């Protein structure tokens, strides 16, 4: 047996509330990230990711409260990303109950923060999140971007994740900006290139539209698969994705009745 | 699953500065224990079950453990046949030594053997994996297909003494995923993050206290 392919729903959270609409039946409050986290846990999610899109620092306090409540009620791993800039930010999120922390823009601005976080807490807590856009002019053909792909960095995406892993990132969240929202499937060439570049786990994100899109991403080298809207809108269930993965010969964790 | 309990066995979750313990605290409660999070050695000595957590690096955890003095309490409890449970690095430090980045640090040393880097193409070993339960009481009622959440780069290897039982997992190579030896139980994986299977495993430990 081997480690299971992880299926990870991602929730956008703004000031303690889920931003994008979610279509889950039987929820008292579909805007509460903790209630959704419980629903996804029951549905068989292997991990959860909260992306904190809160703009103000005052609003961020509500995020810590959400993370605390989630850690007390949901017993699967939780990654929190968004606005993480310093070792102290990581410390606060871990103390609140996050298991892992996603770092994106801050690492591009100052790559040493990766080593600082890894030295203090171990590389297993650090998920380097890379928003990757297609660019013919970079050596690999991909460029890492910030602000959801709107701001360019000029940095080659594959060289960047290689460097991030060397500095101490324990995992790479590879988000294809081109694929995001298209539902045309994961960016398989990007996943293959990332897989060849690093030995840490790779989480593929961006482009999933149906359950059949997931197995090819694992064949291309992804260790975990993250998606948002298709899960939230009930277009595809976690169970359907796992059935598809299992049928393709990939190990999955089957949901256990509580 | 057992309801939350304020009347279950007296369990101390020992706080020596090893990161977040919120999930472990709640998961133990959910599994039926009355849990106290403390760095008080008298409480650690006197409780019915002592839980030693651990996240991050072996050397950093061992430093915190030694400075707190809980290493002595763990040895005494083991000698007196009183239950101790180690989780993740709290499992690793039960062995003789750990080697990370070429530096070897002594562990609490209840079990022989060393903890060093797994030989695997993909590290950290991160995610849900199966274990061979090896007849451990911890896995009562849990089938061989159950998966538990692992996050680690280093693993315990070696031959255990007579009377010790080991559950083996595989990531690149075999390593010791869980142990029962006298009053010591420990797991490399995180039962507090392993959903209902993890809750059942914790309940199996708590029910025997």
Image (cartoon, coloured by chain):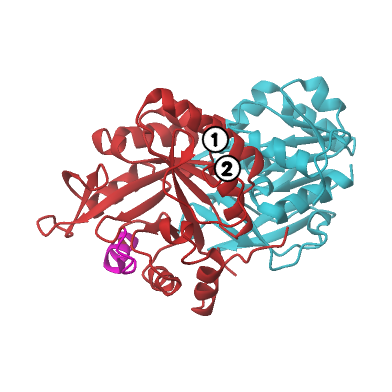
Chain colours: A red, B cyan
Locate residue B98, reporting x and y percent.
Answer: 59, 42
Q: Position of residue B126 (x, y in %)?
A: 52, 54
Q: Is residue A232 left or right of residue B156?
A: left
Q: Which mark is residue A66?
A: 1
Task: Say which residue appears at 87% left-offset and 26% top-offset.
Answer: B46
Drawn side of residue B10 relative to residue A84, left or right: right
Q: Which residues are magenta?
A: A181-195
Asked which secondary structure carries label 1, the reply is helix
The quarter in which the C terminus of chain A is drawn is bottom right
Please identify the quadrant where the N terminus of chain A is shown.
bottom right
Say which residue label 2 marks.
Answer: A34
Chain containing mark 2: A
Vertical placement of B68 versus A187: above or below?
above
Report the front residue among A92 and B117: A92
Please tell me in which quadrant of the rendered image residue A221 appears. bottom left
| Residue B116 horizontal/vertical position (percent) | 55, 48
* Callout 2 crowding tier (Cα within 10 Å): few <14, some 14–19, many ≥20: many
Determine if the magenta segment contains residue A192.
yes
Task: Please report the residue visible at 48 percent of the width from the left and 38 percent of the height from the top.
Answer: A17
Say whether disc 1 or disc 2 marks the residue closer to the N-terminus: 2
């Amino acid at each position: 047996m081997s480690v299971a392919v992880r299926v990870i729903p991602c929730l956008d959270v703004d000031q303690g509330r889920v931003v994008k609409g979610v279509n889950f039946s039987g929820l008292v409050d579909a805007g509460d990230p903790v209630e959704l986290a419980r629903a996804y846990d029951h549905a068989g999610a292997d991990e959860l990711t909260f992306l904190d899109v809160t703009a103000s620092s005052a609003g961020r306090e509500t995020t810590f409260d959400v993370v605390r409540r989630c850690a007390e009620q949901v017993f699967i791993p939780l990654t929190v990303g968004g606005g993480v800039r310093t070792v102290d930010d990581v410390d606060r999120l871990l103390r609140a109950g996050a298991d892992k922390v996603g770092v994106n823009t801050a690492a591009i601005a100052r790559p040493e923060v990766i080593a600082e976080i890894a030295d203090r807490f171990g590389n297993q807590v650090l998920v380097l999140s890379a928003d990757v856009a297609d660019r013919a002019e970079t050596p690999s053909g991909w460029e890492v971007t910030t602000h959801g792909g709107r701001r360019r960095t000029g940095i080659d995406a594959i060289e960047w994740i290689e460097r991030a892993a060397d500095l101490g990132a324990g995992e790479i969240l590879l988000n294809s900006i081109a694929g995001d929202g298209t539902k045309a499937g994961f960016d398989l060439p990007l996943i293959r290139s990332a897989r060849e570049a690093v030995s840490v786990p790779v989480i593929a994100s961006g482009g999933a539209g149906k359950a059949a899109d997931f197995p090819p991403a694992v064949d291309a080298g992804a260790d975990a698969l993250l998606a948002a809207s298709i899960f939230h809108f009930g277009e595809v269930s976690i169970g359907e994705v796992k059935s598809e993965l299992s049928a393709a010969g990939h190990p999955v964790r089957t949901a256990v009745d509580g | 699953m057992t309801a939350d309990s304020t009347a279950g066995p007296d369990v101390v979750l020992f706080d020596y500065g090893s990161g977040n313990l919120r999930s472990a605290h709640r998961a133990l409660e959910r599994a039926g224990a009355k849990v106290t999070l403390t760095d008080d050695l008298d409480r650690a000595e006197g409780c019915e079950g002592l839980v030693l957590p651990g996240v991050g690096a072996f050397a950093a955890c061992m430093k915190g453990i030694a400075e707190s003095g809980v290493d002595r309490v763990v040895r005494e409890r083991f000698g007196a046949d009183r239950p101790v449970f180690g989780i993740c690095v709290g499992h690793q430090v039960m062995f003789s030594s750990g080697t990370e980045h070429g530096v070897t640090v002594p562990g609490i040393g209840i079990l022989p053997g060393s903890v060093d880097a797994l030989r695997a193409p993909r590290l950290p070993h991160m995610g849900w994996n199966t274990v061979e339960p090896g007849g451990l009481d911890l896995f009562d009622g849990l089938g061989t297909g159950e998966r538990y959440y692992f996050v680690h780069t280093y693993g315990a290897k070696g031959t255990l003494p007579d009377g010790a039982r080991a559950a083996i997992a595989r990531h690149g190579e075999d390593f010791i995923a869980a142990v029962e030896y006298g009053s010591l139980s420990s797991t490399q994986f995180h039962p507090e993050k392993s959903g209902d299977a993890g809750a059942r495993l914790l309940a199996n430990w708590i029910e025997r206290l």
